[in-house]
Image (cartoon, rainbow, N blue to C red):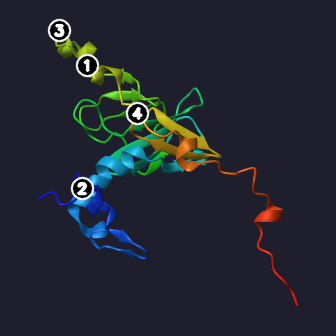
Amino acid sequence: MDRYRGNSQAIADLVKGHAVHRDVYVNEEIFELEMEQLFPNSWIYIGHESQLKNTGDFITSKIGNQPVLASRHRDGQVYVLHNRCPHKGVKIASEPCGNTGKFFRCPYHAWSFKTDGSLLAIPLKKGYEGTGFDADQAAKGLTRIENVKIYRGLIFVRLAKEGLSFEEFFGDPCPRSITWRTARPRVSLR
């Protein structure tokens, strides 16, 4: 039964003042709603640029239930990709971090991808002739995540194509109206 799906009032009632209903932590439906609506639409921290110093360095993470990987490509850029082979869905990088060299190789059927996610090679490529493979998404390689923001070395990602920009989501990190002089609490010493 859908107790919370489509019922914004029931969701709002989960938090009252200082109390949070236990369903926020244990209800499967709430968990599914978070995976569908919260994680893809939020800017999520996945790692720090210093973890990707050299070409071929990578880190893996998860956004909700989605495995992602970030890697430093030979052009110096950091690319964030879905960590799934477009052929059969196997994780490309299973370690939390490392250096893959010049390319990633799928452990299942040995498809290989450049560190920017583009397709490098397919074993037995002739077997795909005339199948429409060239027009398929898999022919483009690993799916790149479009919404990536590196802020002071911190790598943030939003899975959803549309949504709040990084600046709208977090707001101005250092509003000009606040200064150290006015922001410090005044303490009276008597």
Give the foreground label among 1 and 3.
1
Judge depth for marks 2 and 3 and give the one in front.
2
Helix, strand or loop at disc 4? loop
**Picture quarter containing residue 137?**
top left
Q: Amino acid at mark 3?
A: Gly
Residue 14 appears in the rendering: yes
Numbered tag placed on residue 146 in the rendering: none
Front tag of 4 and 3: 4
- Mark 4, residue position: 161
Say which of 130 and 12 sits in front. Answer: 12
Q: How many marks?
A: 4
Neighbourhood count class around disc 1 (C-alpha, 10 Å): few under 14, some 14–19, many 20 upward: few
Q: Look at mark 2 in the image and give the residue it sits on.
A: 7
Q: Counting residues from the N terminus, which is met first, the one under dot 4 or under dot 2?
A: 2
Q: Residues under labels 4 and 1: Cα distance?
A: 20 Å
Residue tagged 3: 130
Instruction: Please provide percent x and percent y for residue 111.
Output: 30, 28
Q: Earlier in the sequence, mark 2 or mark 3?
A: 2
Horizontal side of 102 relative to 35 (left or right) equals: right
Earlier along the polypeptide chain: callout 1 or callout 3?
Answer: 3
